[in-house]
Image (tube, grey):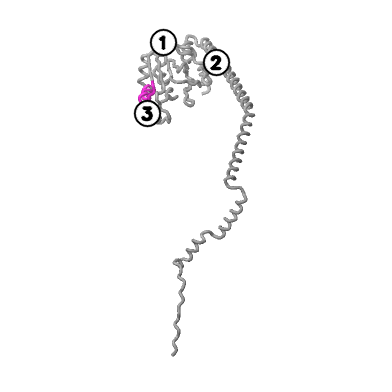
Amino acid sequence: MPQQPPVRSTPTRPSRPDASMSLLTNVMDHSLDDGYAEAAARKRAAGAGGVPKPLRARLGLAGGLVLAALVVTVGAAQARVAAPVVAKERQELIDRIDRETTAADKLENSVDELRRDVSARQREALRQSGGDRTEVVGILSGAVEVHGPGVKLVVDDAKEATTGGDGDPRETSGFSDTGRVRDRDMQRVVNGLWESGAEAVSINGQRLTALSAVRAAGDAILVDNKPLVPPYTVLAVGDGQRLSTRFQDSADGLYLHALQQNYGIRTAISVEGDLRLPAAPSVIVRTAQPHTEKTEKTEKGTS
């Protein structure tokens, strides 16, 4: 039986260690997509014949600086041209303010002269119709200057005004600054002096009458529409010692004392031997009429 020739095996080529990771190998070998690679190549080719990036950036910066300098130059030129016009308008405004201020001062002087004239006519009318009661009526109405013993009361703001506060007597007033004297404080002071027996009262030289009003405009206190500044000096003619005692023991005097104790408002009261109070600028009666016998008979006849 013939013997078959032996089968000779040919040596096989050894496989790669990463043959089982062909996908990862492909990703590593081709990390950049073909389309991106082609676009990058075109960009490099186009840039080779254009202006380099640093040079383009410098040119852009230079253009921006030139534009900014142009804007600044144009603005300065316009301001230089408009400066004389602005100065002229400002001077015209100043001149107008000066003229109006001068006119207002003249009008105020005229008003003062008219008030003095009205006061003189009122005093003359009182002398003609008042008989023996002329002086008393003039004092009570504030139409004449008075002097005599009385009380001097000085009320001033606190040295260091505080804010807030829940205690009496301002817990419901809504004041933002409890260390400042307010119009209602001066109203209570004046009313307390009248109630205590004062015959004539003035605040900082402003004579008070039955028609006077103590009001506020912002932080200022007005007496008959004239602003006053602290300290507020209140002069009251009357029986000095008795007036001082009765006022300090009254509800309004205790109110003022509470302001001094709780809020630091400064007060000082003294008895004076002779005080001089000026006459009121003018006393104008618009509604009240004198009571006469004829009027009384008419009212009885129509009732």
Which residue lies at the image location 41% right of the left edge and 23% below the top edge? 157
Residue at the bottom extreme, as displayed: 1
Query: Between residues 13 and 220, which one lies in front from this camera angle?
Result: 13
Picture coordinates of residue 71, whole percent (x, y): 61, 36
Q: Which residue has dot 3 on it?
A: 168
Query: Between residues 166 and 255, which one lies in front from this camera angle?
Result: 166
- Mark seen at residue 112: 2
Query: Of label 3 and label 1, which has the lower sequence position?
Result: 3
Going by the numbered disc 1, the residue's amino acid type is Asp
- Mark seen at residue 274: 1
Where 174 sits versus 111, above or below? below
Can residue 293 be seen from the camera position used here? no
Can residue 86 be seen from the camera position used here? yes
Picture coordinates of residue 134, whole percent (x, y): 48, 11
Helix, strand or loop status at disc 1: strand
Picture coordinates of residue 242, whole percent (x, y): 36, 15
Q: Are marks 3 and 1 in contact (CB under 8 Å)?
A: no
